Image (cartoon, rainbow, N blue to C red):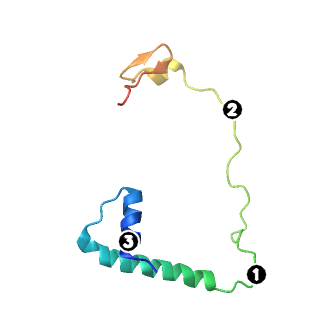
Amino acid sequence: MVTREDIENIALLSKLFVDEKDLDKLTEEMQKIVEFADTINKVEVKTGEFDNINNLSNVFRKDEVRESLPVEEILKNAPEQAEDHFLVRKRA
């Protein structure tokens, strides 16, 4: 069972703010999600052939080595650059 405390803890861990007035509704909705997941887990599976139901094989293209753009071309719109790389400001 999902409790208000569970929702508050999840919000805290996720660094999300949940308004006090929304806690009851969110708790109820989260409980329904958990119940639905439990229902799916209880379904009896007659075959274990679900891992490739679309009969797909590797759909990715092969890696190909190609020439890159010249460094000057890549850096021409960079606001700040030095030698052959971008300069970025350090964030505090």
Q: CA distance from mark 2 to mark 1?
A: 42 Å
Tell whether label 3 touches label 2 (CB within 8 Å): no
In the figure, is residue 14 to the left or right of 71?
Answer: left
Give the class, few, some or many, for how many residues have Cα within 10 Å of label 3's Cα (few <14, many ≥20): few
Where residue 47 sits in the image (x, y, percent)? Answer: 76, 81
Considering the numbered disc 1 on the image, is that residue within a helix, a strand or a loop? loop
Give the mark nearest the N terminus, 3 or 1: 3
Q: Residue at 30%, 60% (x, y): give it.
A: 17
Q: Residue at x 41, y 64 (%)?
A: 10
Residue underneath mark 2: 65
Q: What amino acid is found at the position of numbered circle 3 in the picture?
A: Glu
Q: Is residue 82 above or below residue 37?
A: above
Q: Report the Cα–Cα distance between label 3 and label 1.
A: 39 Å
* Comparing labels 2 and 3, the label whose residue is closer to the camera: 3
Q: Position of residue 74 (x, y in %)?
A: 48, 24
Q: Secondary structure at mark 2?
A: loop
Q: In this orientation, which residue lies closer to the viewer: 74 or 11?
A: 11
Q: Which residue is the site of mark 1?
A: 47
- Residue type, mark 1 in image: Thr
Residue 49 pos. (x, y %): 75, 75
Nearer to us of marks 2 and 1 is 1
Height in image: 17 above or below 35?
above
Q: Residues within 10 Å of mark 2 (few under 14, many from 20)?
A: few
Q: Residue furthest top?
A: 83
For the point 74% across and 85% down, the residue is 46
In this rendering, position of residue 84 left or right of residue 6:
right
The residue singled out by tag 3 in the image is: 5
User: Against 63, is 34 above or below?
Assistant: below
Q: Which disc, if any, is residue 78?
A: none
8 and 90: which is toward the camera: 8
Q: What's the residue type where badge 2 is placed?
A: Val
CA distance for labels 2 and 3: 54 Å
